[in-house]
Amino acid sequence: MQTKLSNRSQLIQEAAMATMGNLSRKLKAQGADIVTLSLGEPDFNTPDFIKQAAHNAIDQNFSHYSPLPGFADLRQAISHKLLRDNRLTYKPEQIIVSTGAKQSIMNALFALLNDGDEVLLPAPYWASYYDMILLAGGVPRVIPTTIEDGFKITQKHLETFVNNKTKLLIFNSPNNPSGAFYNQEEVNRIASFLINHPNIFVISDEVYEYFVYTNEKPMSMAQFPELYERTILINGISKSFAMTGWRLGYMAAHQDIARACDVIQGQITSGANSITQRAALAALEKDPQEVTEIAFMRNEFRKRRDFVYSYLQKVSGIKTILPEGAFYIFPDISGFFGKKFQNKTINNSFDFAMLLLNEAHVSTTPGVAFGVDRCLRLSYANSLPELEKAMNRLADFVRKLE
């Protein structure tokens, strides 16, 4: 039987991270020693006090449907967190808890986009944004940046790409995949442009907010009074508390947007996992400065970042800059395009990543998945011994290119 799929389903592709993950698992099953630098998750365990909260929730029989937008006390805790950490005032009814930050973003796209609306998407971008926009009927307008730009957009970039179809900007700082972090002055400039374009909404993806390696705190677009009602703030617990598998994220927005997302979510998943919500409550009630596990992860990631950056600087043919946030580095490997490995020509980042995986047993993610084909995403959320092994293999691999 020939199955005729919907046009919408054929617009989108499998996530590149999933593709590389599947290939890595197959090689591992065959006995290969794969060093994985393709996963976008902390390699640490969830803090014990959060796990204990989940145990308590099970014992207290939190096994029934939760309220669709999330338990009231969790939304109150998120409200308090946003005031405490971000100097933002949101009522609980402006907050929707979802099954991961990805669902929060998808809800917002469904709530805001009509067919043909354009979404400004600075590249490099998190790989899923592009296909999510298509799934919601929008048109991605990719804004290219380069390593020389620090992988950051400016007012000039926005002036070039904004038109009367522009509905939304997706802004992600610290950034996945580049690790770029917009300081206060850079955010001010972008905000001033958006303030003068009152029809543009902003999705502000802030999931890496606790992983910044400068002395500055992240600044949210929602902190500008003129942008507060047009900003959909996205955050979660997966990165900050090493809880990727727990699946919980949240959004904070104008009440009309939040209500629309509540209705949309009600027709897709209903409320998020009840046990996870109780664990998230324990996590978010604490001041992050008092959670020693966050400081430990941040310090470990900084050490790993410095090691990988220092190593890559010594590899001829690779260009890179020091990432200021998240746990990724995004080197430019286009200097190897046109070179060969055993008669296999490297034409793009996908070719490079596949050869690196199959021949050197290092799993990465090709930059084409993030809108920048010249680069390669390396996650340094792995131990220093494994990172050293990966760097040695990478250096040995590129030396063999002809």
Image (cartoon, rainbow, N blue to C red):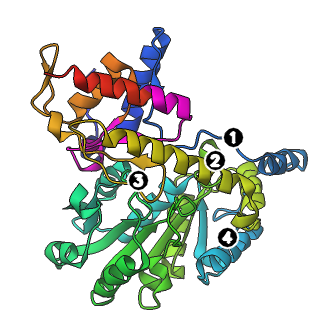
**Label 4, on which residue?**
78
Q: Is residue 387 left or right of residue 362?
A: right
**Label 1, on which residue?**
45
Please name the amino acid that badge 3 sits on.
Answer: Asn
**Residue at image x 22%, y 75%?**
158
Q: Spatial distance from mark 3 to mark 4, Cα to Cα?
A: 23 Å
**Label 3, on which residue?**
176
Q: Spatial distance from mark 2 to mark 4, Cα to Cα?
A: 18 Å
Frontmost residue, 268 versus 112: 112
Q: Spatial distance from mark 1 to mark 3, Cα to Cα?
A: 21 Å
**Residue at image x 24%, y 63%?**
149
**Residue at image x 67%, y 70%?**
78
Please name the amino acid that badge 2 sits on.
Answer: Ala
Q: Earlier in the sequence, mark 1 or mark 3?
A: 1
Q: Spatial distance from mark 2 to mark 3, Cα to Cα?
A: 16 Å
* Quadrant location, the N terminus: top left
Frontmost residue, 240 versus 109: 240
Please name the amino acid that badge 1 sits on.
Answer: Asn
Q: Is residue 15 visible?
A: no
Q: Earlier in the sequence, mark 1 or mark 2?
A: 1
Q: Is residue 214 visible?
A: yes
Q: Tag 2's secondary structure?
A: loop
Residue 271 quadrant: bottom right
Q: Is residue 366 magenta?
A: yes
**x%, y% of residue 163?**
16, 77
**Label 2, on which residue?**
242
Q: Which residues are magenta?
A: 365-389
Q: Is residue 207 left or right of residue 152?
A: right
**x%, y% of residue 333?**
23, 39
**x%, y% of residue 58?**
84, 45
